[in-house]
Image (spheres, grey):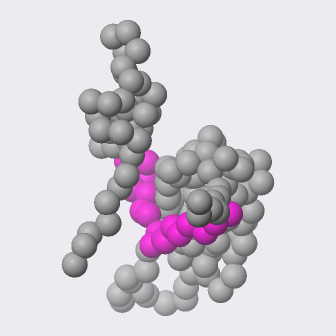
Amino acid sequence: MTLPVRHRPGSPLERQFPGFGWGEPIAAEFDELFERMNRLLQGATAPPTALAWSPAADMRETDDAYVIEAELPGIKGDDIDIEMSERELHITGEYKERERAGVLRRGTRRTGRFEYQALLPADVKSDEVSATLHDGVLTVTVPKAQATKPRHIEITES
């Protein structure tokens, strides 16, 4: 069985290193790595804000967009806040506990603040993001920028 190989232009020694700086492809990879590490460290050292929990979510990629589906059963659209900056999607909200009559003997439902963050892998059109809430599933569609869409290349035989 042959495993897939990620092809990049040239080997690391063939890439250009202008002056004493890094070439653009390598610098971009390191910048993304450092950005993710900073986010991880900030999250680890920040005090917990009312013990927020993260909903179960899937992120898939289509030719035109990134689609995030988060499970938020019983939560109203008014209780959900979605923010989008350059490449980062941030979904927050609160699942309010219902008022009940009688004594609660056992409770296993999550309540309180929730938070979901996703760092998208490419440039997106943050001003064209759309969201729908249906049957307890929040679907956020983030369109890709034109430059990141895959392009089919015809092969001509000579």
Q: Which residues are magenta?
A: 48-66
In the image, residue 4 sits, relative to residue 24, either above or below, namely below
Residue 35's spot in the image, x, y percent?
A: 40, 35
The answer to whether 2 appears left or right of 30 in the picture is: left
The answer to whether 1 appears left or right of 78 in the picture is: left
Q: In the picture, residue 131 is in which quadrant?
A: bottom right
What residue is rendered at 36% in x and 39% in y?
10
The answer to whether 54 appears left or right of 132 in the picture is: left
Residue 107's spot in the image, x, y percent?
A: 38, 83
96 part of magenta stretch: no
Task: Give the farthest residue toward the left.
Answer: 1
What residue is rendered at 36% in x and 20% in y?
17
What residue is rendered at 40% in x and 28% in y?
27
61 part of magenta stretch: yes
Q: Main secondary structure of the magenta part?
A: loop
Task: Give the farthest residue toward the front.
Answer: 158
Q: Quadrant of the C terminus?
A: bottom right
In the image, residue 156 sits, relative to residue 45, either above or below, namely below
Q: Quadrant of the N terminus?
A: bottom left
In the image, residue 12 sits, relative to residue 142, either above or below, namely above
Q: In the picture, residue 9 is in which quadrant?
A: top left
